[in-house]
Amino acid sequence: MNYLAHLHLSANSEPIMLGNFIADAVKGKQLLHFSPGIQQGILIHRAIDTFTDKHELVREGKSRLYPVLGKFAGVGIDLFYDFFLSMYWNRFALVEKQEFIRHAYRILVANYGVMPPKMQHLLPFLVISNWLGKYSTFSGLRQVLRGMGRHTALPAGGDRAVAVLEANYLQYEQEFLDFFPLLKDYLTKSFSLDF
């Protein structure tokens, strides 16, 4: 899952959203420097990543992406799943997508000072480029991948992964539609989150 899914899977809790957003930049026990709600968001993010990385459906999708993205195939799958979440937003969310995105940006910007430097660096690009709003088209997905190539560890040229999505669209779509409800059910049971 990438940023849109992690924010959505925060059950509309501001501290959980913030923790879920910054989690990749918080290593080990660094989470103890944050409030309990943000800590919970970090732990939820880690649980999402673990559940996702171990699931057979996700591993199948990664295997098709590995020739293009190598060790970053998991990042590609995360973005593909944000793409499908954006496409099927009304099936999985009660709040209108653009309203949710505006709300998420407000929360993130308001908490800029709490974020680790890595996320402080990324946030302006994410908001100004409207990454959360671009996930729903192939061209938008390419733009996000190019942006990640400039501002994260993802290597340049990662936008070629979109060709893999286009060539295997129905397979990726079905894998997402089968997997995402399982992930939400896992989070509901493990963290008592209400979606």
Image: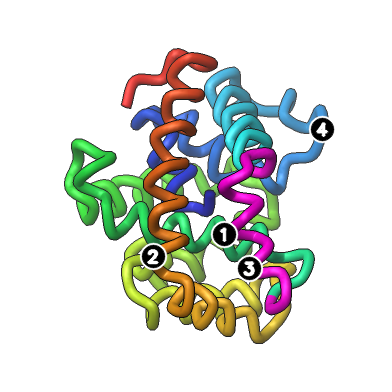
- Label 3 sits on residue: 64
Amino acid at the residue labelled 1? Ile
Amino acid at the residue labelled 3? Arg
Q: Which numbered tag is attached to residue 49?
A: none
Q: Is residue 71 magenta?
A: no
Q: Is residue 57 magenta?
A: yes
Q: Cα distance, mark 4 to mark 3?
A: 31 Å
Q: Secondary structure at mark 3?
A: helix
Q: Cα distance, mark 1 to mark 4?
A: 24 Å
Pick the front one: 90 or 171? 171
Amino acid at the residue labelled 4? Gly
Q: Residues within 10 Å of mark 1 (few under 14, many from 20)?
A: many
Q: Residue at x 31, y 53 (%)?
A: 101
**Considering only order in the chain, which callout, 3 or 4, is on the residue closer to the N terminus?**
4
**Considering only order in the chain, which callout, 2 or 1, is on the residue closer to the N terminus?**
1
- Label 1 sits on residue: 77
How would you classify the magenta stretch by its main secondary structure?
helix
**Considering only order in the chain, which callout, 4 or 1, is on the residue closer to the N terminus?**
4
Compared with 12, 145 (above or below) is below
- Label 2 sits on residue: 170
Q: Position of residue 36 (x, y in %)?
A: 59, 18
